[in-house]
Image (tube, helix red, strand yellow):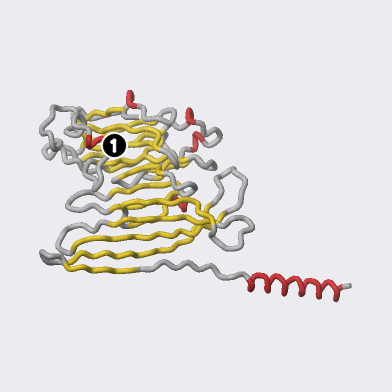
């Protein structure tokens, strides 16, 4: 009996090994190209197409049944620029591929596709978020766009390192971002003739897949010019502070108070701190915005005399 069992186990092992060996390898090829064209007035127009491949594991949301899923990330950067001009514009197309259960090949199902203006891309929060970065030019600031890796939906646009709030042991996250008027791409409100002369930037509160609230940070004084603000419109330092003596402080914080019941009413007890350079002769200006019931609590915000907050959403 023992001999029969040993032979059966050996046969099963050989069969399994043969099955694995018979599986075809996964291959994906995308051409990398470079093109240079002389310009009539001197210099060159250049175009570089640079693919980049990555793999990551998409974990099921905390508390949700499911198995980890391997994802293949296909990224293609198309860089077009002129050698006698500043800046290096780059377009990015990213597609995430998964494997259909029972499929004949690996990575045969498109999860999402993103088309963006971006020079770089990376993962945030242990693979929970995907970030693209469009480089600034000529004193403008880099612009980051942050997406949910589960579905490719836009969560935030920011010119600073975003603040991320984690409700531990749940899938609930909140993202606090700030999009300045100095970004290489400005907020949509820059096109508003009434707002633009006083607008410094937009602070947002988002879930992993959606921008929930938007608030404009504006100068409170009279309009100095129709084309620029009195203060430099560059981004402030952004940090989050959780209430209580043991509360977290930084750009990634944990909101333990909402762990057992992470409904919107319990997304509270922390504040956003924005430190602006301020006027040259007066020093830094600090804005504090509490978060109450999953929203910016503007009534209890602390704002310097020269600034004001205006709700947009």
Query: What x and y, as percent, mark residue 257?
Result: 49, 34
Near-viewer residue (257 or 210): 210
Left or right, residue 22 beside residue 49: right
Q: Quadrant of the N terminus?
A: bottom right
Quarter-wise, where is residue 268 in the image?
top left
Say which residue label 1 marks: 202
- Asked which secondary structure carries label 1, the reply is strand
Give the residue at x 12% y 65%. 40
- How packed is label 1: few (under 14 Cα within 10 Å), some, or many (20 or more)? many
Left or right, residue 107 beside residue 291: right
Give the residue at x 35% y 45%. 162
Give the residue at x 25% y 33%. 217
Query: What x and y, as percent, mark residue 72?
Result: 49, 59
Q: Is residue 301 above or below residue 117?
A: above
Residue that protrudes farthest toward the front in the picture = 40
Q: Quadrant of the C terminus?
A: top left
Numbered label tally: 1
Query: What x and y, as percent, mark residue 69?
Result: 56, 55
Q: Is residue 154 above or below residue 4?
A: above
Left or right, residue 209 beside residue 223: right
Give the residue at x 38% y 64%. 51
Near-viewer residue (265 or 91): 91
Near-viewer residue (39 or 66): 39
Left or right, residue 275 beside residue 97: left
Query: What x and y, as percent, mark residue 238?
Result: 31, 42
Residue that protrudes farthest toward the top in the picture = 299
């Amino acid at each position: 009996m023992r001999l029969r069992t040993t032979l059966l186990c050996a046969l099963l092992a050989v069969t399994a090994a043969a099955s694995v060996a018979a599986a075809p390898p996964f291959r994906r090829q995308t051409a990398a190209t470079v093109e240079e064209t002389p310009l009539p007035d001197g210099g060159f127009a250049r175009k570089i197409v640079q693919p980049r491949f990555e793999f990551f594991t998409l974990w099921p949301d905390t508390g949700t049944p499911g198995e980890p899923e391997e994802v293949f990330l296909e990224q293609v950067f198309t860089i077009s620029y002129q050698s006698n001009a500043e800046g290096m514009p780059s377009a990015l197309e990213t597609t995430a591929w998964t494997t259909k259960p029972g499929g004949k090949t690996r990575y045969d199902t498109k999860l999402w596709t993103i088309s963006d203006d971006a020079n770089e891309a990376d993962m945030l929060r242990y693979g929970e978020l995907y970030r693209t970065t469009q480089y600034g030019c000529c004193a403008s600031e880099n612009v980051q766009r942050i997406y949910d890796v589960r579905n490719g939906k836009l969560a935030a646009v920011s010119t600073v390192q975003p603040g991320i709030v984690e409700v531990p042991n749940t899938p609930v996250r909140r993202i606090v971002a700030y999009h300045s008027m100095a970004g290489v791409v400005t907020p949509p409100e820059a096109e508003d003739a009434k707002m633009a002369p006083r607008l410094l930037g937009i602070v947002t509160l988002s879930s992993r897949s959606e921008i929930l609230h938007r608030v404009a940070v504006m100068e409170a004084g009279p309009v100095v010019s129709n084309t620029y603000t009195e203060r430099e419109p560059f981004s402030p330092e952004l940090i989050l502070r959780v209430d209580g003596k043991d509360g977290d402080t930084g750009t990634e914080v944990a909101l333990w108070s909402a762990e057992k019941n992470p409904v919107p009413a319990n997304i509270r007890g922390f504040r956003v701190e924005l430190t602006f350079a301020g006027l040259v002769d007066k020093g830094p200006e600090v804005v504090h915005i509490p978060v109450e019931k999953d929203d910016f609590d503007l009534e209890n915000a602390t704002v310097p005399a020269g600034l004001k907050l205006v709700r947009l959403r």
